[in-house]
């Protein structure tokens, strides 16, 4: 799995597939049910952002081996959509550009241990999150 | 994945049995709102015990269901939110606002019965 498993996300069905795959990989890596649910929820939000804002993209999973036997799961949600004009605004709670509950990015950040976002208007968004096993 | 809706007296019970896509959730919303009208139901229970994840879309749709049904004069209770799912919802910053929740189907029914007694 170190090569990474990639899921193409183009519809709301794929959102379900991505989070189920993420949960399965998390459990396989020894995460607890509770941690796996946090991970699956984060994936659901990220994958839905892809479908809602970019129409298509990919979710890639990669297992990590850190020092002192630390085990983690890295998830990369990437799209070539419109991108986010003001990333810091999108990371603020309560901000939404579509009148809904927002991109859910602050929430995703709370669910995971590490969070990184790279976005450019017109060329897409890549969100990278990691959860470490406790 | 269609969600079966059972009619029991004046209550409709929708039991989610597997992971739902966004489209499935919207379909459930429309089915419930129509059936509440059709059967003149006084209460609706949505059993989410089998839901693997309650993300922002699912929470928002459940809120909408509850608000629409309230406009018909009926109450909605969400039952069976799993502990792990509840934990993730809180971390994500989601609440079901004013929708009543109950541990399971039995408590959900008891809640609705109590409500209708108080009103009548």
Image (cartoon, coloured by chain):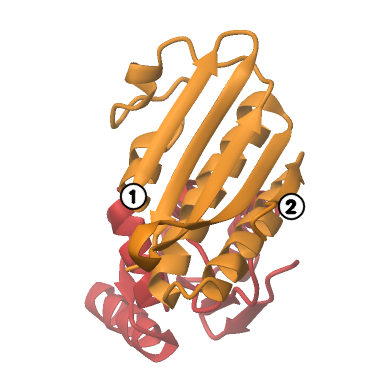
Chain colours: A orange, B red
Mark 1 → mark 2, Cα distance in angstroms:
27 Å
Lower sequence index among marks 1 and 2: 2
Question: Do the numbered discs 1 and 2 sit on residues whose CB atoms are within 8 Å?
Answer: no
Q: Find the residue positioned furthest to the front.
A: A68
Labels 1 and 2 share a subunit = yes
Foreground label between 1 and 2: 1
Horizontal and vertical percent for residue B42? 45, 71
Q: Please rate how many residues cluster around mark 2, counting C-alpha atoms within 10 Å: few if below 14, some from 14 to 19, many from 20.
A: some
Badge 2: chain ID:
A
> Height in image: B48 above or below A122?
below
Image quarter for residue A28? bottom right
> Height in image: B50 above or below B19?
below
Q: Secondary structure at mark 1?
A: loop
In depth, the one of B48 and B69 nearer the eye is B48
Can residue B20 be seen from the camera position used here? no
> Height in image: A92 above or below B89?
above
Residue under the point 28% across and 76% down: B115
Can residue B43 be seen from the camera position used here? yes
Quadrant holding the N terminus of chain B: bottom right
The answer to whether A73 appears left or right of B25 in the picture is left
The answer to whether B64 appears left or right of B96 in the picture is right
- How many labels sit on residues? 2
Horizontal and vertical percent for residue B31? 67, 60
Residue under the point 26% across and 72% down: B119
Reading the image, the residue beneath label 2 is: A13
Reading the image, the residue beneath label 1 is: A113
Q: Find the residue positioned furthest to the bottom.
A: B106
Q: Please rate how many residues cluster around mark 1, counting C-alpha atoms within 10 Å: few if below 14, some from 14 to 19, many from 20.
A: few
Q: Find the residue positioned furthest to the left.
A: B118
Horizontal and vertical percent for residue A3? 69, 52
Residue under the point 66% across and 50% down: A15
């Amino acid at each position: 799995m170190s090569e990474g498993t990639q899921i193409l996300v183009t519809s709301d069905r794929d959102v379900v597939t991505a989070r189920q795959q993420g949960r399965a990989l998390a459990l396989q890596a020894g995460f607890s049910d509770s941690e796996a649910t946090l991970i699956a929820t984060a994936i659901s939000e990220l994958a839905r952002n892809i479908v809602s804002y970019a129409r298509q993209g990919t979710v890639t999973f990669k297992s990590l081996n850190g020092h002192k036997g630390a085990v983690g799961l890295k998830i990369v949600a990437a799209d070539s959509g419109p991108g986010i004009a003001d990333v810091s605004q999108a990371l603020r709670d309560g901000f939404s550009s579509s009148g809904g509950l927002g991109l859910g990015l602050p929430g995703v950040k709370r669910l995971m241990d590490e969070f990184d976002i790279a976005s450019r208007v017109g060329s897409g968004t890549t969100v990278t999150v990691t959860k470490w096993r406790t | 994945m269609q969600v079966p809706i059972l009619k029991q007296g004046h209550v409709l019970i929708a039991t989610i049995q597997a992971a739902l896509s966004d489209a499935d959730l919207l379909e459930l919303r429309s089915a419930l709102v129509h059936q509440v009208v059709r059967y003149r139901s006084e209460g609706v229970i949505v059993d989410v015990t089998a839901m693997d994840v309650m993300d922002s879309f699912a929470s928002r749709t459940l809120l909408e269901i509850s608000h629409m049904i309230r406009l018909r004069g009926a109450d909605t209770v969400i039952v069976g939110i799993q502990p792990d799912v509840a934990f993730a919802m809180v971390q994500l910053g989601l609440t079901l606002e004013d929708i009543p929740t109950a541990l399971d189907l039995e408590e959900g029914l008891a809640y609705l019965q109590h409500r209708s007694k108080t009103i009548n």
